[in-house]
Amino acid sequence: MNVQRFYADGVLDEIDESGNHIPGNWHFTNPQETEYMVTNSSGDFPGTIVKLDQGHFNFYYHASDGTTRYGELIPAHNPLLLIKI
């Protein structure tokens, strides 16, 4: 399981299955803020938000292996989102 932390300032921190830290950035790509782009040392990865509210962040994203995957929020008691992908 990878864990990603999306910060409001556009910073993204990811820890992969091996425990490696992968720093990156993210931003919305449309005015409705339903599509986003993650950029890190492996490339650019677009995603689409399926549900976003106080208790949910569910999304599809395009992984580095070329597949489309589904992810969902794991609630945390801090000012960031922990993502199980």
Image: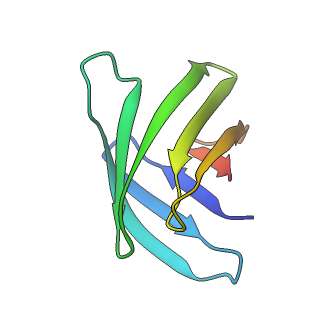
On the image, which quarter does residue 9 sit in?
A: top left
Residue 43 versus residue 12 in the image, above or below:
below
The coloring applied to the image is rainbow
Residue 15: x %, y % from top left: 60, 71
On the image, which quarter does residue 24 sit in?
A: bottom left
Residue 63: x %, y % from top left: 53, 59
Task: Locate residue 16 relative to residue 49 in the image: left or right.
Answer: right
Residue 10: x %, y % from top left: 32, 48
Task: Locate residue 19 relative to residue 25 in the image: left or right.
Answer: right
Q: Nearer the viewer, residue 34 or 62?
A: 62
Task: Locate residue 83 relative to residue 26 in the image: left or right.
Answer: right
Residue 60 versus residue 62 in the image, above or below:
above
Quadrant of the rendering where the N terminus is positioned: bottom right
Count of numbered labels shown in the rendering: 0
Image point (67%, 43%), residue name: 71
Q: Is residue 77 visible?
A: no
Image point (71%, 42%), residue name: 76
Image point (41%, 24%), residue name: 34
Image point (68%, 38%), residue name: 73
Q: Nearer the viewer, residue 49 or 76?
A: 49
Residue 31 versus residue 20 in the image, above or below:
above
Q: Is residue 62 visible?
A: yes
Q: Residue furthest front?
A: 66
Residue 32: x %, y % from top left: 32, 15
